[in-house]
Amino acid sequence: MTTDRVLDGPIEPPAKPEMQRLFAIARIDSGARFLVESKPDERAALARRMGLVAIHALTCRFDLRRDDGDAIEARGMLRARVRQICVVSLDDFDADITEDFSVRFIPAGTESEALDPDSEDEIAYEGGVLDLGEAASEQLALALDPFPRKPGAELPGAATAPEISAFAALAKLLPRD
C-alpha cells in the first residue's frame, strides 16, 4: 500500500510535543539514567509530524551528567522501527534504526552562535527541566534516511546503463588521421 506524503519545508515541533518526558536537572547529582519509551498514540503523532507511514517502536536511553556550570552532557542510544516510503518504488517498507548520539542541554539563551558541524548538538532548556521525550523525537528525525530505499529497489535501467569514461568520450572527438 502506498501513501502520498508532501512535506512543505522543515519539520517543526508542535507547541506541545507529542512525546513529552520532563526530567528535573536537580535530580542529576553525579549522573542519571532515563529511558524514554513511546506509547502508540505518541508514535502515531510523531509519524504524522515526520512524514512517516508509521512508527512501530521507539525507545531512547539517556545517560546524563552535569558539565561545568548549568550544561548537562547526554549520551544515549535510540532504537526505532519505522515504516517509510521508498523513493524508488514508492512502496512502504519497514526499517530498523539504531543510533548512538551525544548532545548538550544548555540554558535557553546561551546557545552557541558558531556553526560547527563537528561540535555536539545543543538543546536549550528552561526552568531547570529537560524534555527528554522531545530530545528523543529530534534524535529520531536526525537518524532518518532522507532518501529511504527499500532493500533491493533499483532505478529502472540503472543497472543496464553503459559506463563510458570521460576520456573515451573525448577520444571520439579527436580527428583521426
Image (cartoon, grey):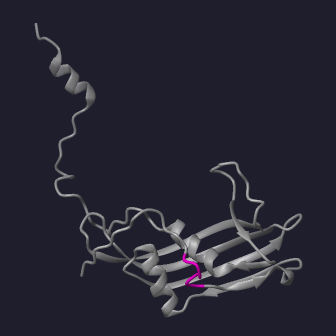
Instruction: Give the left or right position of residue 77, taking residue 11 as reference.
Output: right
Quarter of the rendering occupied by the C terminus: top left
Which range is magenta? 14-19
Q: At which x and y percent is residue 97?
A: 49, 74
User: Is residue 22 positioned above or below 97 on the image?
Assistant: below
Q: Residue at x 42, y 80 (%)?
A: 48
Q: Residue at x 64, y 67 (%)?
A: 101
Q: Using the image as rendered, state which of residue 7 and residue 1 is in the foreground.
A: 7
Q: Using the image as rendered, state which of residue 116 and residue 162 is in the foreground.
A: 116
User: Is residue 137 positioned above or below 118 on the image?
Assistant: below
Q: At which x and y percent is residue 29?
A: 89, 79
Q: Residue at x 65, y 49 (%)?
A: 115
| Farthest residue, direction top | 177
Quarter of the rendering occupied by the N terminus: bottom left
How many discs appear? 0
Q: Residue at x 56, y 88 (%)?
A: 38
Q: Using the image as rendered, state which of residue 132 and residue 37 is in the foreground.
A: 132
Task: Please tell me in which quadrant of the rendered image residue 24 appears.
Answer: bottom right
Q: At which x and y percent is residue 65?
A: 82, 73
Instruction: Give the left or right position of residue 148, taking residue 96 as reference.
Output: left
